[in-house]
Every structure is written in C-alpha cells, then in structure tokens.
Amino acid sequence: MKEKIEQVNRYIKENRHRVNHCYRGKFHLLPPIGWMNDPNGFVYYKNEYHLFYQFYPYDSVWGPMHWGHAKSKDLIHWEELPVALAPSEVYDRNGCFSGSAIVIDDKLVLIYTGHVEEGNVRTETQCMAVSHDGIHFEKYAGNPVIGEKHINGIADIADFRDPKIMKYDNHYYTVVASKTEDNRGQILLFESDNCFDWRFKSVLLVGKEDQGIMWECPDLFELDGKWVLIMSPIEMKRKGNQYWNLNSTLAFIGGVDWESGYFQVENFHEIDGGLDFYAPQTCVNDKGERYLVAWQQMWHRNIPTHDLNHGWAGMMTIPRKLSIKNNRLYQEIPETLTSQLTIQERFSGQVDQSELVFSSAVKQQQYLILELEKPEDFELIYARNVINQQGVKISYNENNQVLSLGRERLGHKIIGKEEPYADIRHLNISDPPKSLTLEILRDINSIELFVNGQTMSMTFYEKEFGTDIVLTNADKLNIKTLEFYDIA
Ligand code: FRU
C-alpha cells in the first residue's frame, strides 16, 4: 500500500492549487481536492479527534475509494493528514469503503470494507489496518477478517459493508450493514475477544418493508441509559414530512438483549430533516461526550462545485453533541464553537413594523439565534439578495408546528433528475414548544438549523452573495432573543 499512498499524497500536493475556493467553508471538514462522502473512523485518540472520510482525490466525482484523514482538538479546526488507506490489495482493489476506528493499547485500529468488482460480481468483506502513530497505517496480514464464511446463508456478500466497531463488557463488537433476500435492510452483529478473530453473533435488527431496500453505515452506542442504533436506509418510503430524500437517516432508540443479540426498538425517527445529510457516525471523547458527524450531501444530486469545475465536492456537517430527550436524539452545536463567537448585533422586544430588515448583516461564517416566546408564524429570509430578493427561506407554521427550510430559486440548481421532491424540506417539531429556539449556523455554502434539539442541514450555492437578514410578521412575535454573531 505504501507506494499507492505516496502516489496519492504526491498528487494532492501537486494539484491542490487548482481547487476553486469560492464555496469552501472555514470550519467544516472538506477534501483538499476531489470528492468526499461518508465520515469514517471517527475516534478520540491521544486527546484529539480523528476523522477519516471516503475520498477520491483524482476527480470531483465518486471513484475508487481511499480514506482521507484529518484531526482536530475542538471539532472546528481541522488539520489535514496524509491519506490513510488506498485500494492496493486483492481484497480491496476497487475501494476501501466505509468503516470505523477503535483505540487499543495506544494503537489506532481501523476496520473497513474491502470492495471488489469482477464483471457483475461484487464482493464486500471486512478488513483491518493498524497504526502506531495515528498517521501511517498498515493493512492487517490476516485480511479479510469477516467474509463469506461468516455470513453463509445469512446475507449476501455483494451488499455487506460499513463495519462500526465498539467495545462492551470486555468483548469487541462490530455492526455491519446488509439486506435481506426480499430487499429490506438488516444489521448484522459480530463478536470478538481479541478484535481480529470474529464470529457471527446475530441479526441485530431487520427493517420493515417501508424502511428502505438496504441499510448502510450503522452505528450502535449507549447514550443516557439507552442503546441507540443509527443507520442510513436507501429509498426509505416518504412518510408525512419525514424521509423525503432518496436515501435517509434513521435513529432507533431502545435496548439490546446481549444474550440473543437483538435490538429492542422503543422509538425511531429521522435524524436530520434537511436536504443534505447522510451516513452519520459518532465518537465518544474522554469525558464521555458523544458527537455525531455526517456527510453534508446526498447521493444522486448535481453538485455545483463539480458542475462548475471547482475541483472538489462534498463536505462534513458540524459535529453535533448528542443526548437523549423524550426517547429521541437531541443534537446541539458543540460548545467549542459557541464559545468562539463575536457578537455583531443584538435585538429584543416588541416591533411595530411587520418586516424587520437587517441590511448588510450577513457574514459568510455566522451564527444566529432567534428565541420566541409563544411562537407565531414567521419567515426568516437569510442572506437575501438585494437585487433578486432570493435567499435561504426558513419559515415556521404555528398551526401544525412545522419548520421549513428551502433553497428554491436560489443560486445554482442542485436536485438531480431522479428526485421527485423540490428544494424544500419540512420538519415536525416533535415536542410542541412553548418557546422556540432557532439557531442557524452558516459557513459559506452550508446552513445547519438547530431547533429545540432537532436539526436540518442544507448546502446552497448563491450566484451572488446575499447580504440581508429579513424577519417577517415581526410585529406579531414575542422576540426574547435575536442575535447575530460572527464566527472568527
Ligand atoms: C454510503 C456508502 C457506503 C459505502 C460508501 C462507498 O454513502 O454507499 O455504504 O461504504 O458509501 O463510498
């Protein structure tokens, strides 16, 4: 693998100057050049967060997968590291697909899917790699560690991927995504005493008919006394305001019976209600705090940075701090970010005009908080362009307690031909609020909404940057807080 890694790192060094920076965020992880999808190997190692990702540096479209690598002390500033994995062996020659990481005795251990295609035959097996310095990785000589013999009669080797590893009760466990014969998602559980020799334990959970034709990127963890199983279903059926993207994300909350290896579902819901959010993965730090990060994009879309020849495509979300409230995932902006804000403008009280306009208030990196007592309908147009009046549209409907986020008619078009639903998403506020706290995080082309613990994530590509922030129905609102901050 060494040669392949040297070759790809050389390519990145020699070509990265070709990347156009116009839409590149400052506090989100992006590929230095080329294509990025799923977060991989998110782990806390020697007092730093390491985050790997599905990476094809040679073009801004998906290709044979490598693992890009970065680390951070605060989840906001990322330091780029050399590429960690490249396809190089018989068992991973068409790609090192998604996977995860664990720390064992100061070593950083990765488990990933070796992807092979021969004609129409696809083989996916689970493989490992080890690093002593957290930078250079060596593939394990005994690869693949989980393959055909482990799943004979249980699942198809053609759709068997994205291992997420964890340690519990002195055993190592790995959950792996697969599908049933009749095209429903299922998650398989494997067990090991030494982390390298694996045995099949159970089918942890099988999806219902309307829960997608295949599940990808599972993650299983304990949080606030519950077990949580998250994954990304392909073609989950749209239901009310949920699951509008072609592929969605799901959180199951409940318990695990470790004798049988079955997950007992108490509740489930979509993880993020926005347009661009897929394949989330979590990591826990030394204080026991758990953070979730996802690919802030979606399959089958036209990505403008590719269409415009900017030389890169794909980004991560901001990592969100997780907890459980009312048997649901509750997501918050990390304190490492909110503690770095510089106040720009503060507004509160009663207004007599119906439209509040803050001219030239928009920053390319910005945090905005709007707190309303007894919320009424409103529309917040963020980054409204003075000439064409377009901007990111956030609106709240008090009648049915739905928050909407849209990029219709805004900038470069994104939605792909295959997608039936327009550039707008709606989120049911799960716990009808007496007060509504809406936080907006903007990093050039990314907007993430946090509202009472729920989130909506979206990318947008303005042709000319909008400058104004507009709040409608302002005279009917009881504004407790309205503040804008610059993110330095
Ligand atoms: C999810 C996914 C994974 C796979 C990877 C390939 O987005 O399809 O299932 O491992 O992307 O890049």
Image (cartoon, grey):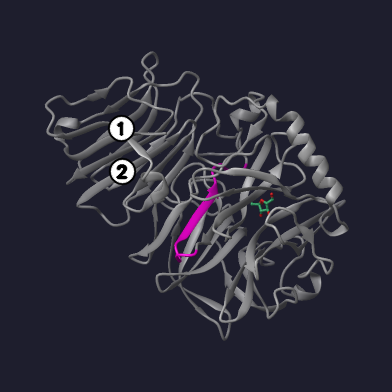
- In this view, 242 is above or below 123: above
Quarter of the image for residue 22 reads top right
Quarter of the image for residue 58 reads top right
Kind of residue sitting beneath label 2: Leu
Q: Which residues are magenta?
A: 286-299
Residue 192 or 305: which is nearer the viewer? Answer: 192
Kind of residue sitting beneath label 1: Leu
Q: Secondary structure at mark 2?
A: strand
Q: Which mark is residue 438?
A: 2
Q: Secondary structure at mark 1?
A: strand
Residue 202 or 81: which is nearer the viewer? Answer: 81
Residue lying farthest bottom?
259
Could one spot residue 211 in this view of the protein? no
Whether residue 368 appears in magenta in the rendering, the answer is no
Left or right: 90 as drawn, with respect to 114:
right
Q: Which residue is mark 1?
A: 380
**First in sequence: mark 2 or mark 1?**
1
Which quadrant is home to the C terminus?
top left
